[in-house]
Amino acid sequence: MKIDVATLFPEAFDGLKVGVVGKALAKGLFELRLHNIRDYSADKHRRCDDYPFGGGAGMLMTPQPLHDCINAIDPAHRARRIYLSPKGKTLTQRRVVELAGEEALLFVCGAYEGVDQRVIDLDIDEEMSIGDYVLTGGEIAAMAAINAISRYIPGVLGSEQSTDEESFSDGLLEYPQYTRPAVFNGVAVPDVLLSGNHAEVDKWRRARQLELTRKLRPDLLKGEDK
Ligand code: ADE
């Protein structure tokens, strides 16, 4: 998979160079290319913002640098072009899995109070939010999406890690997990996990998943046994 990012703050993406995603990038399991929108500004001071017509608080990103940047990166419009915005559809695990199947993604990060609407209308396929709160720009949202998507790229997670048995993979929260020691601070691991009886362990885990989901995220239980 190829992932391009258009941003005024490419250095923000240093956060993707660590851990599992950093290793995957170093191994070339997917490509991440960062593009500084400012490099495309035709303004002699490389400005990328201006006041909103009609008035209002703050500045907007002007259309020219963004439009030119997006179309220089993806001239034939082969990538799925995603603008990060609190107005977008909220990213879900299901959408993460779908996006992991795309050949090319282009994430466009806004800053200030947003971007000129014409860029969205002309150049963007979808707007994506990572939740109902407002960030100062799209960078953290793009990183969250890239991190989540990369986990579905073959080879990114080691064989000991898996996307099969985790929160949301089957619409439920994950069961609680324990490791050594068997007793910590006077609290023992549930007996069934030490029993070696895999069928009983599976039953226990499923019951905990349902119990936790019912308690913490009942909204996820549509169509499940409530
Ligand atoms: N940009 C600002 N806030 C955002 C959010 N919640 N999701 C995605 N992009 C954003």
Image (cartoon, rainbow, N blue to C red):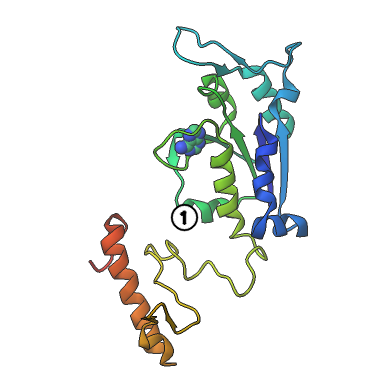
- 14 or 95: nearer the viewer: 14
Residue 221 can be seen, yes or no: no
Which residue bears the numbered disc 1? 93
Q: Position of residue 47 (x, y in %)?
A: 68, 15
In the displayed orientation, state which residue is furthest to the front.
185
Mark 1 residue type: Gln
Q: Position of residue 30 (x, y in %)?
A: 71, 54
Q: Position of residue 6 (x, y in %)?
A: 66, 33
> In the displayed structure, does residue 177 sit left or right of residue 112?
left
- 28 or 181: nearer the viewer: 181
Residue occupying image coordinates x 55% and y 47%: 144
In the displayed orientation, state which residue is furthest to the top.
54
Q: Quadrant of the C terminus?
A: bottom left
> In the displayed structure, does residue 89 sit left or right of residue 36?
left
Residue occupying image coordinates x 34% and y 82%: 203
Q: Is residue 125 above or below residue 29?
A: above
Residue 56 can be seen, yes or no: yes
Q: For residue 167, which quarter of the picture?
A: bottom left
Residue occupying image coordinates x 48% and y 51%: 95
Q: Position of residue 22 (x, y in %)?
A: 70, 55
SS of the residue under disc 1: helix
Determine if the C-beta at disc 1 is less than 8 A from ligand 1. no
Q: Is residue 208 above or below residue 67?
A: below
In the displayed orientation, state which residue is furthest to the bottom.
196
Residue occupying image coordinates x 69% and y 36%: 10
Q: How many marks?
A: 1
Q: Is residue 44 above or below residue 123?
A: above
> In the displayed structure, does residue 172 sit left or right of residue 45?
left
Callout 1 crowding tier (Cα within 10 Å): few <14, some 14–19, many ≥20: some
